[in-house]
Structures are given as structure tokens and as C-alpha cells.
Image: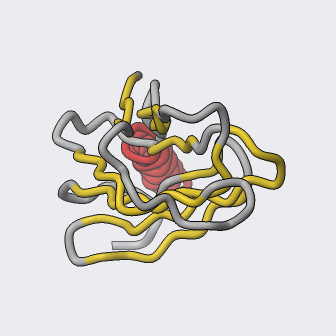
Amino acid sequence: MPLTVHRAGRVLAVGIVLAVAAACGGDATTSGPSTPLMVRLRTPNTVEGAAVFRVRGAGVPEPQAEAGTLFTRPLADGWSVVVLLDTAGVPRFRVPTDAEAVQVELVQVAAPDNTLRTDLSGYTVEVAR
């Protein structure tokens, strides 16, 4: 059956509708989380120089810097995160996820003079939205 002008117009219209529908569907799945998790070290000292954290959770995206310089390494169940502060302060970072089942563990802390803190008993990790 030959393609008539009327039939060609319908095929073009259906193609445009499908393209628009596909584009709309893509936007909904690629939008980011509305409120990231904010992770902050609670320290018994006034300031720190660096900290190492372990972030765990299924499908947790890569953490992002909030203060200082952030280095990450993927783990089987999350991320290893190192926060280096250019000026002494409190290490913090964000995790762009809506997931509730994210665990953050403190691994190590360094003082502003780069010496490792030997006792981490007074430290906690604050995770908030």
C-alpha cells in the first residue's frame, strides 16, 4: 500500500507523540534527590585537619565535598571518604541520596598538624537531612 500524504501525517504525528512521551519519562528517572544527607564530624576538639569515613548502603551515590577537599574510593557496599581541610575546622560532606538506610562510620581523625588522634572515644558522626 503506497504511503499517502494523509497516512504519512499520521505516522509523523504518532512518532512525535512517542518521542515526547519518551522524553518526559526520562526526566522523571534522572532527577536528583530533593534533600541530600549532610554528614558532619562531632569532635571534642575545637578544630580538626582531616577525617576518614566509611559510608555504607545499597546503591549509595558518590559523596560530595561540603568543606575542604574530598577523596572517595568505591567499596563493595558503599564508599571510603577522606575529607582534608585546607584550614582547620570540622570535616563534613554530603551524600546525594533519598535512601534512609545509609550508615556512616568514623575510621580515623587527624589534628590540624597532621598527627593522628589516638583516642576517638569522644567523636561522633552526625547525619541529618
Name the residue located 55 percent from the left edge and 44 percent from the top edge: 93
Residue 40, given in percent of the width and then of the height, sits at 49, 35
Residue 100 as seen in the image, left or right of residue 129: left
Residue at the front extreme? 118
Residue 112 as seen in the image, left or right of residue 26: right
The correct choice, above or below, for 55 with respect to 6 in the image is below
Please name whichever residue, 95 or 92, is drawn nearer the observer in this view of the structure.
92
Residue 95, given in percent of the width and then of the height, sits at 45, 45
Q: Quadrant of the C terminus?
A: top left
Residue 90, given in percent of the width and then of the height, sits at 62, 38
Name the residue located 30 percent from the left edge and 44 percent from the top edge: 121
Residue 16, given in percent of the width and then of the height, sits at 51, 47
Residue 70 as seen in the image, left or right of residue 39: right
Whether residue 13 is visible: no
Please name whichever residue, 112 or 60, is drawn nearer the observer in this view of the structure.
112
Q: Quadrant of residue 101?
A: top left
Whether residue 91 is visible: yes
Residue 49 as seen in the image, left or right of residue 11: right
Q: Quadrant of residue 28?
A: top left
Please name whichever residue, 2 or 52, is drawn nearer the observer in this view of the structure.
52
